[in-house]
Image: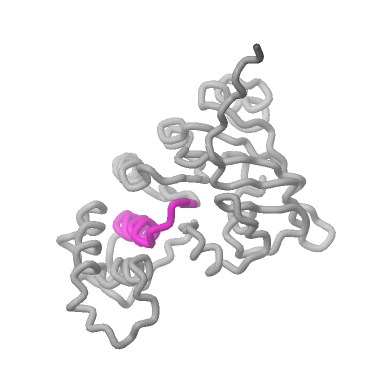
Amino acid sequence: MNPPAAIHPPTAIQLTDVRKSFGRTEIIRGVSLEIRKGERHAIIGPNGGGKSTLFNLISGKFPVSHGTIKLNGEDVTNARPFEINRRGLSRSFQVTNIFPRLNVYENVRCSVLWSLGYKYSFWNDLNRLGDVKERTEEVLEQIGLTARRHIPAAVLSYAEQRALEIGITIAGGADVILFDEPTAGMSRGETEHAVNLIRTLSKDKTLVIVEHDMGVVFDLADRISVLVYGEILTTGAPEEVRANKAVQEAYLGVDA
């Protein structure tokens, strides 16, 4: 009697031979990768390795030169960013991306409105939408900005703005979240707070994170992929990647 076939978790993101060229320069060189539903997956590598470019391909900001990208089993290759977002993917950016003239509450509410299906219903009295108010209050509490709700986003501290962006990203209701260097520029204390925030808010979601802080990566990630010069060097559990000699030489350093 043959042993039962291995059961593989469903795939949230599937890249098959994805390539991206700018003119004659090939930045992403045949990336094939499966990211499982519900996992926290980190993508690491040296500067210029193609990490942000790969994020831009997955989220639709850049068109793919070759290959296919699937989101929850659906082909989204070269779909527009808003179309991919509506199919369940949201992302943050290296540079904080918020509405600086709106206050903290209004920033979060904008994201909540779409996630609850109100979209462009301009005739709704926002103050009477109980479900929107409840969800917005919940997110503000989660990101620790309830007391700052009426403050214009532009005058928040850098760490508070990053926390707000994380809240906006999560509040949109997507089940696949891309975070591009969410702790960049933070102090050690701010980084620890951000990691705890991300861990809490990404529960039961698929999280893909680009991050240079190896403490953050090894603390958060279930699996890690190492991207070097546009190619995946290896993918594995944190302890496997840490012990990989090729990774040590290419990125972590031989004394890792």
Q: In the image, residue 58 lies at what x, y percent?
A: 60, 55
Vertical side of 157 occupied by 9: above or below: above
Q: Nearer the viewer, residue 104 or 18?
A: 18
Q: Which stretch is magenta?
A: 159-178
Colour scheme in use: one colour
Name the residue at 49% across, 42% down.
37
Left/right of residue 189 with respect to residue 34 in the rendered view: left
Name the residue at 62% across, 32% down.
251
Q: Which picture quadrant has residue 115? A: bottom left
Q: In the image, residue 151 lies at what x, y percent?
A: 21, 70
Q: Quadrant of the C terminus?
A: top right
Q: Residue furthest top?
A: 1
Tally of marks: 0
Q: Which picture quadrant has residue 224? A: top right
The prevailing secondary structure element of the residues shown in magenta is: helix
Left/right of residue 214 with respect to residue 67 in the rendered view: left
Residue 166: in magenta span: yes
Q: Residue furthest front?
A: 1
Residue 212: in magenta span: no
Name the residue at 60% across, 50% down.
73
Name the residue at 51% across, 61% down.
87
Q: Is residue 63 among the parts visible in the rendering?
A: yes
Q: In the image, residue 201 lies at what x, y percent?
A: 33, 47
